Amino acid sequence: KCEEEGGSVLKHGKRQPTVFLQRLVRVFFGCLASVACGMLYAVYLSTYHDRKFWFSTRQELEREITFQGGSGVYYYYYKRLIAAPSFERGFYELVVDNRTVSGQTINAVERLSLYPELITSFIYRVTGSQDFVEPIYFYIGAVLGLQAVYVTALFVCSWVMSGTWVAGMLAVAWYVINRADTTKVDHAIPLRDNWALPYFSWQVTALTGFLRNKIGSSTEMFCYLTMSATTFTFLLVWEHSHYVLFIQGFCLFLLDSFDLVPPRKMADIHKVYLSSLFLAYMFQFQNTALLSSPLLSLLIGSVLASENCFQLGVSHMGSDFILKFLEVKFGLNTTTDFVPNFLLCQESFQTPGQDLFLRLTQASVLPFYFLVLAVCLLSALQAIYRRLSGQPLCKTYSLENGGIGEKPEVVYHVFHTMLFGGLALLFDGMKYLWTPYVCMFTAFGVCSPDLWMTVFKWLKLKSIHPVVLSLILSTAVPTIICFSLWREFSPRVLAELSELQEFYDGDTVELMSWIKSQAPVAAVFAGSPQLLGAVKLCSGSAVTSLPLYSDINLLKRTEDTYQVYAMRSAEDIYKLLTAQKTNYVIIEESICSELTINKGCRIKDLLDISNGHIVYDKGEIYSFSKYGRFCHEIKMNYSPYTNYFTRVFWNRSYHVYKVNSVISFQY
């Protein structure tokens, strides 16, 4: 059966134009549906964003504060490029930037991966968009447009694998319903992964098409060129992209090891990786992180367990720190150092809660995912066993064969979802990579006649013709799923668009207004990284650190700034702040008086541990020092605190103190 080429095509040559026309119509309506899904999703996001933040009715300062989680610092650079006399001048000022981090001159384009802002601001200038759209709407529109591209890619990928664009529509439906676990664009628009993941999704789609056995030369070339362009762009716009590509490269390595992909195709894929890494290295000003990337180590054939292969999520950190971080994460060691404990307490590095899997189960995607994964994995293992036993695989696949695991693109996605899923079980941040492809992979499976036929082959079904039943189930099951999803979740989605949410951070608006109107232009501010991102965006003032957790030097500066929440003397804090050339320090009430269930991850607890202020007594843990907690003591307004600091602004959430340039001793 594997060698039958279907001679009926010769016997019925007259039917070829009809078959071609039918395929053309299917492709046309499939493309139309994919583009429509992407555009509708972008409109939905735009409407939801406006309703959530009352965006269109806010003033400029209030709009900027909605960029939460410190992500606003990226928009600051975009705004700075727009305000520059020319694009060239703005680019130069970012490459030699001495107006951001106090006492340092940094290459902001390399350090913060600012190519999205460079490209967006350039397009904004050359298209003359400043005449009819505000810069902030152009920026947000670019990000939301990429989310439409993201959804379209998931649609096409599921369509290509299953052969029906119904799978694409189901993939998009699951993606939108599980939006809280598939994207962070709702609350932090400028984040790098919001710019990068749409390119990665198209890269995966192009790779899926490239791996297929039955593919024409022109289609293969199109997939190859698309894969090349998206791989390079993905590397360019996100500092962590080469780690993601390493995981993908490892999946392809497994396919190559089992001889499931022709050597020619693997060589072409390696060329894509190497050329993209080289170009990204040049465009990112000879970024050494790419030279030490695990992807390059994999490509040049080095040992996978070498130190380079353990560089998870932090580009500029040393290998010693990486190993210490992973040892603490996996419970192999403990440390009192602030920086690794601080990173482990970040939400993206923590283990996901059970609510993630509960939400995916309620949306029905997780049960079907395990079903599809089990069938594809078992079929793939059968194919691998036959391959290792020296038995040839079918070159010409047909539905009657019932071996979905013999398709290299399917085996790739099995490895892809399993590896990403394993990482998602360890790091909550990985769910934004894993969950979208769970939606896509599951939609492909339930809509694929090949998967149902594989099951019927195992069951040796004879009472009903298995091919007919496979075609019926591959249509009926997704139809039932779509109908149930529509009944259960469409009211909730529509309610999100009609419901006005009240988001207004009056205290932060008041703080930023004071900084813009009262603080000197050359002032340097210290505070938490998230708040400093907002300070940088809204005022342009220099700051002591940035919300960038991939730079060990900035993390050390953040640790010094956070000492205002420790039990340290006024003199110690003064020395730390003046060493960073700080003029004003902002103390946040939410950090100083933080009350959470997980006390071990409070900033003040992490500081007490690293400073050796923890005392263990009869199984209880206490914090003890001969000095009181600085953020509390300074509010008492007595010596020696008034000798070093002068309060200049306060409200319910923030207290701003001027770091005195001349110390006046009062008793």
Image (cartoon, rainbow, N blue to C red):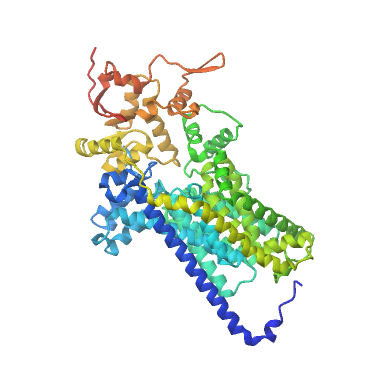
Res 257 quadrant in image: bottom right
Instruction: Kindly give the residue lying farthest to the bottom in the view shown.
Output: 14
Image coords of residue 388 (percent x, y): 76, 59
Q: Position of residue 218 (x, y in %)?
A: 55, 75
Rendered view: 130 above or below 658: below
- Residue 91 image point, x, y percent: 31, 54
Instruction: Name the side, left or right, on which 335 lies relative to 83.
Output: right
Q: Residue shown at 38%/48% (left/top)?
A: 499
Quadrant containing the C terminus in the rendered view: top left
Note whether residue 300 is visible. Answer: no
- In the displayed structure, 181 sits above or below 601; it is below
Residue at the outermost top position: 667
Q: Is residue 101 above or below residue 337?
A: below
The structure residue drawn at horizontal position 34% and vertical position 42%, both measured from the top left corner, is 502
Quadrant in the rendering for residue 528: top left
Count of marks placed on residues: 0
Q: Position of residue 375 (x, y in %)?
A: 69, 56
Q: Is residue 66 visible?
A: yes
Give the left or right position of residue 336, taking residue 57 as reference.
right
Q: Say if 472 sits above or below 371 in the image.
A: below
- Residue 419 left/right relative to 493: right
Pick whichever, 38 or 541, lies toward us. 38
